[in-house]
Image: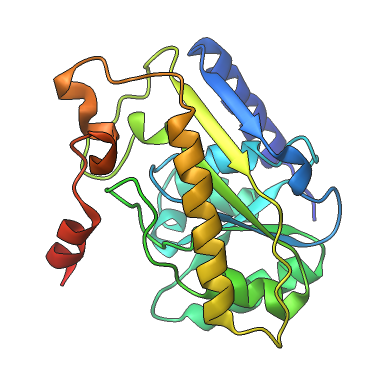
Amino acid sequence: MADLVYPPVIAFAKTMFRALNMKITILGEEHVPASGGAVIACNHISYLDFIFCGLGARRSRRLVRFMAKEEIFRNRVGGPLMRGMHHIPVDRDAGMASYKAALAALKAGEVVGVFPEATIDQSFTIKDFKSGAVRLAAATGTPLVPMVLWGTQRFWTKGRPRDLTQRGVAITISMGEPLHPTRRDNGDTVSAELRSRMKTMLSEAQRGYPQQPAGPDDRWWLPAHLGGTAPEPEVLEAEAQ
């Protein structure tokens, strides 16, 4: 498919990275295949995650087609950009259409990006997963690449005012060895393995992160188990019920 919108968007993003002097660390780039279909499963802590998740695939010269909620495609500004980059709208009331679109993209040799937590995790841990990423990889015989991001929440996340002009913020993008699920595998078992790997990867990214909160009022972007003030996962689950 023709990509007239994606390359200039990437160029603009890289210009902003340099202007803001971001400290971006990318680990495990070799795990994104240079050709053929693949599913990237990424944690979700920020409204900007798709930008940095896509950056992780650039060494392999891949353009990631993200599955994103349909409301974004109705936005006056974001909609044309999302469609121009051939991302895949997800209508939660009619999910089969988006699933079939993702299947078609994978069979055509595209890389599809999925956030298996479905929504931003305000606890900055790893929430329970939806089954879509595993189902897509198993149905198409494509590798399932785990990815985690850390630091992106400091720019713009759920329940916090956005601060897009911070300078010198560290961002960690880490990719792990792919899983290779098949139709014969138990989907719940594969999802549990994927989640376990991503939890370990996120813990490693958090431990190796080179920056600390500037003071007590800045501890909101750390999870509670690391001494931050982000809400505990159990509290968020109780509020959602």
In this rendering, is residue 7 above or below 163?
A: below
User: 13 or 126: which is nearer to us?
Assistant: 126
Residue 113, horizontal then vertical, whole percent: 60, 56
In this rendering, is residue 156 above or below 129?
A: above
Instruction: Specify the quadrant of the image occupied by residue 6.
Output: top right
Q: Is residue 50 left or right of residue 241?
A: right
Instruction: Specify the quadrant of the image occupied by residue 36.
Output: bottom right
Q: Residue furthest bottom?
A: 184
In this rendering, is residue 40 above or below 46?
A: below
Instruction: Specify the quadrant of the image occupied by residue 5.
Output: top right
Q: Is residue 75 left or right of residue 107?
A: left
Report the residue at 64% width, 36% height from top: 55
Residue 175, horizontal then vertical, whole percent: 64, 44
Name the quadrant of the C terminus: bottom left
Report the residue at 47% width, 56% height from top: 73
Q: Is residue 96 left or right of residue 203?
A: right
Q: Inspect this view and state whether residue 232 appears.
A: yes
Q: Is residue 79 left or right of residue 145?
A: left
Residue 85, horizontal then vertical, whole percent: 64, 49
Report the residue at 64% width, 31% height from top: 26
Name the quadrant of the N terminus: bottom right
Q: Inspect this view and state whether residue 67 appears.
A: no
Residue 11, horizontal then vertical, whole percent: 66, 26
